[in-house]
């Protein structure tokens, strides 16, 4: 028997003005995008802003449906918008933020497993690491060097 140890290091910032300027701006864009969330059922708003290698920023917000399984996560809305508008351009970073009027989120909210898988695929597709910036409504901000830090045992096309 042997053991494998997996470690992740996360940069933790006390406030957004300590972040590198381009990520502070990206987080601001994500916060603005919260107004585009359609979340009448959960009332949990999520917004993601992606920064492309060409400097473009695209946002996506969660889109819910009375048929709950149809709900779209903000991260995948933003990644799909980027892939549709700029299919050849790498994604450098994604900032994700949330708002829950019923239970204010005071810690970074991390993306769901499905969104982690799509982020991992996007890294493989363009052969680059995507920085991930996470903040709740307030509180500390996490900066991860690569989306794969959120999904250590990822599934990818090499298995197929
Ligand atoms: N949601 C996201 O937009 N991203 C995630 O990574 C987790 C969950 C949305 C889906 C649904 O509209 C609401 O949050 C509650 O699950």
Image: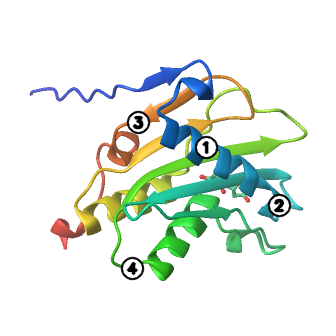
Whether residues under marks 1 and 3 lie with C-beta atoms below 8 angstroms apart, the answer is: no
Q: How far apart are marks 4 and 1 (CA)?
A: 23 Å
Q: How crowded is mark 4: few (under 14 residues within 10 Å), some or many (20 or more)?
A: few
Measured as percent of width and height from the top left, residue 108 is found at 61, 32
Quadrant that contains the C terminus: bottom left
**113 w.r.t. 25: above or below:** below
Q: Which of marks 4 and 2 is nearer the N terminus?
A: 2
Q: Tell me which residue sits at (34%, 38%) in the image.
A: 145
Indicate if the residue with disc 2 has its beta carbon within 8 Å of ligand 1: yes
Q: Earlier in the sequence, mark 3 or mark 4?
A: 4
- Which tag is nearer the camera, tag 2 or tag 1? 1
**25 w.r.t. 7: above or below:** below
Q: What element carries label 3?
A: strand
- Residue beneath disc 2: 39
Q: Residue 87 carries which label?
A: 4
Seen from the viewer's position, the closer of residues 58 and 104 is 58
Q: Tell me which residue sits at (55%, 74%) in the image.
A: 81
- Which tag is nearer the camera, tag 3 or tag 2? 3
Q: Distance between the residues labelled 2 and 1?
A: 20 Å
Q: Which of marks 4 and 1 is nearer the N terminus?
A: 1
Q: What element carries label 4?
A: loop
**84 w.r.t. 4: above or below:** below
């Amino acid at each position: 028997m042997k053991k494998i140890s997996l470690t992740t290091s996360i940069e933790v910032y006390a406030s957004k003005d300590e972040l590198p300027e381009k990520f502070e701006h990206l987080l601001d864009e994500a916060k603005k995008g919260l107004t585009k969330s359609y979340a009448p059922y959960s009332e949990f708003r999520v917004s993601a802003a992606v920064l492309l290698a060409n400097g473009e920023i695209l946002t996506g917000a969660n889109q819910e449906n009375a048929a709950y399984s149809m709900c779209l996560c903000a991260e995948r809305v933003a990644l799909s918008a980027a892939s549709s508008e700029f299919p050849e351009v790498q994604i450098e970073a994604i900032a994700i933020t949330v708002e829950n009027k019923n239970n204010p989120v005071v810690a970074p909210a991390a993306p769901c497993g499905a969104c982690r898988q799509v982020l991992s695929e996007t890294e493989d597709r363009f052969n680059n690491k995507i920085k991930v910036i996470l903040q709740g409504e307030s509180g500390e901000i996490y900066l991860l060097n690569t989306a794969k830090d959120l999904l250590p045992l990822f599934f990818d096309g090499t298995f197929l």
